[in-house]
Image: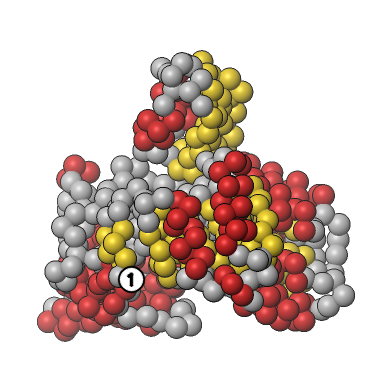
Amino acid sequence: MTKLADGQTLKGMFNAGTSWLEKSAPDINAINVFPVPDGDTGTNMLLTMRSAIEEANHNANNDTSSVVKAMAHGALMGARGNSGVILSQFWRGLAKGLGHNNYFDGSDFARALAEATQAAYQGIINPVEGTILTVLRDSAEAAEKAAESDSGNLILVLEAAAEAAKDSVARTPDLLPVLKDAGVVDAGGQGLYVLLNGALHFLEGKADKIRYWKPSIVASESALTPKTLPMSTEIETPYGYCTNFVLEGQSLSLQKIRKDMVKKGQSLVVTGDGSLVRIHIHSFEPGEILKYATRLGVLHEIKVDNMDDQYSKFLKMQKEKLPVAEMAIVTIVSGEGLSNIFKSLGNAIIVPGGQTMNPSVRQLFEAVESAPSDNVILLPNNKNIILSASQVVSLTKKNLRVIPTRTIPQGIAAFLAFNYDLNLEENARAMKEAIGRLRTIEVTKAVRKTQLNGLKIKKGKPIAILDDKDLIASGEKMLDLILSALEKSGTEKAETITVYYGAEVKVTEAENVAQEIRNQYKSEVEVIQGGQAHYQYIISLE
């Protein structure tokens, strides 16, 4: 390995880092503060890096400056979720640090890591220590110290950065109490360590060997951290093939089908009975899905769609249908029922996405550009999409306002506050006020045993999260859990309670829940089929 590296070396380093990240993405997804079934940090970082690598591969120039700028652009456009956006800021800083170099050495790379740290911190309005930001800063400081002892040695510098990142990840729970309470390290920091470690393996000539190895998950220095985490077996990727079919058979077990198929893709929905089951799943291997199902019975109404093609056609179709207007709304939503709700509220461009399906910055940009107006309001409807949505502001020439809706009910409340008689700024203010008057309870089932917020949580049992921030209840039975969550959420002050039930909840079950709520409270209670995955119920309080 020569002391001077070029763009081809940089590409090779992070191509190896991305491959290394791919191997650990399911494990990183499992590192989640809340024990919910939709961790996606590993997936978002992986897809962001894939976009960076793809952009670099389209660049025939091997100069470091050209390659790093291409990767920075690719990372920005492909950024998904908070972790992906921070990673794109990392690349923006690297591009600033290496953007004038044809070649680089250890000292150059150390300075670029310092620029990456500054860019990442500046990209976050309220940076929090104990996250990927801290890990990045610690790795950059270690790299600079290593460069002082041997400025040209790139391997030495990257080795110091990776080792410091590993140590920093282990300390994240000591800086962020919520991580310590949950017994986990920071998932984004873990992803950064894996990425740097993979790049180091490339420089050490181990690119071929690591195909047979697997990255290790950093253990916290805190004694509260569990020795093992629930590991996924597949990477949940938002796009690929959307596969739908009906399975006809005898004595079919919905529970076993769910257990077998959850390993094969994401956004899994299994409904029906012992003789007729309807299945929906997103996967890169639809053939594997269908092969499994044919062993259980006869398939009907088979439909397999390429979701990338689907997305482009979906935007084009919506644009053609919507009239030109002074203002337009772009909203992110998943679930057939929830999508229908937004369609019923007025003209809007709907971007499919949400939990485990965070749209990229490029997809949000394309949606904004396709809106039939130069004045656009964007509703993320998910806390992990807000940062990605904010990146679009600087990319589009349109007048764009991002309303920081963290949940689907907040998005609906904001949409209801929209008024064509108001201008863009007035609508933005009204919509922000509307989301402040609403509370959201999300109900799902825990994916691991843990203790959090003083609650003992059992794997597979229902839990409730308030306003996408606080775990407020856990229990044995769904109905009891919901009533407990309502009691802790100031429900007695709510005039209207809306219950959106998920894809695997029967309408009779949802109606029973609603009736029990009516028996307890004087509020008006409405039941709506949301069709969302992962969360059995989403409940809004107004």
Residue 331 appears in view: no
Question: In the picture provided, is 327 more to the left or to the right than 65?
Answer: right
- In the image, residue 424 sits, relative to residue 204, either above or below, namely below
Place of residue 330 in the rendered image (x, y in percent of width and height, measured from the top left): 69, 62
Place of residue 438 in the rendered image (x, y in percent of width and height, measured from the top left): 62, 72
Q: Residue at x 69, y 62 (%)?
A: 524
Query: Which residue is nearer to you in this view: 93 or 473?
Result: 473
**Type of amino acid under label 1:** Asn
Q: The N terminus lies in which quarter of the figure?
A: bottom left
Circle 1 — which element? loop
Q: Residue at x 60, y 53 (%)?
A: 514
> Which of the 4 image quadrants contains residue 145?
bottom left
Question: In the picture provided, is 211 more to the left or to the right than 313?
Answer: left
Q: Residue at x 37, y 56 (%)?
A: 475
Q: The C terminus lies in which quarter of the figure?
A: bottom right
Query: Which residue is nearer to you in this view: 249 or 285?
Result: 249
Place of residue 113 in the rendered image (x, y in percent of width and height, measured from the top left): 31, 76
Q: Which residue is mark 1?
A: 453
Place of residue 325 in the rendered image (x, y in percent of width and height, measured from the top left): 85, 65
Question: In the picture provided, is 260 more to the left or to the right than 200?
Answer: right
Residue 456 appears in view: yes
- In the image, residue 535 sits, relative to residue 172, either above or below, namely above
The figure's colour scheme reads secondary structure
Query: Which residue is nearer to you in this view: 67 or 335?
Result: 335
Q: Residue at x 42, y 67 (%)?
A: 472
Mark 1 Cα-neighbour bin, 10 Å: few <14, some 14–19, many ≥20: few
Question: In the picture provided, is 467 more to the left or to the right than 16?
Answer: right
> Which of the 4 image quadrants contains residue 65?
bottom left
- In the image, residue 346 sits, relative to residue 165, either above or below, namely above
Query: Which residue is nearer to you in this view: 195 or 81?
Result: 81
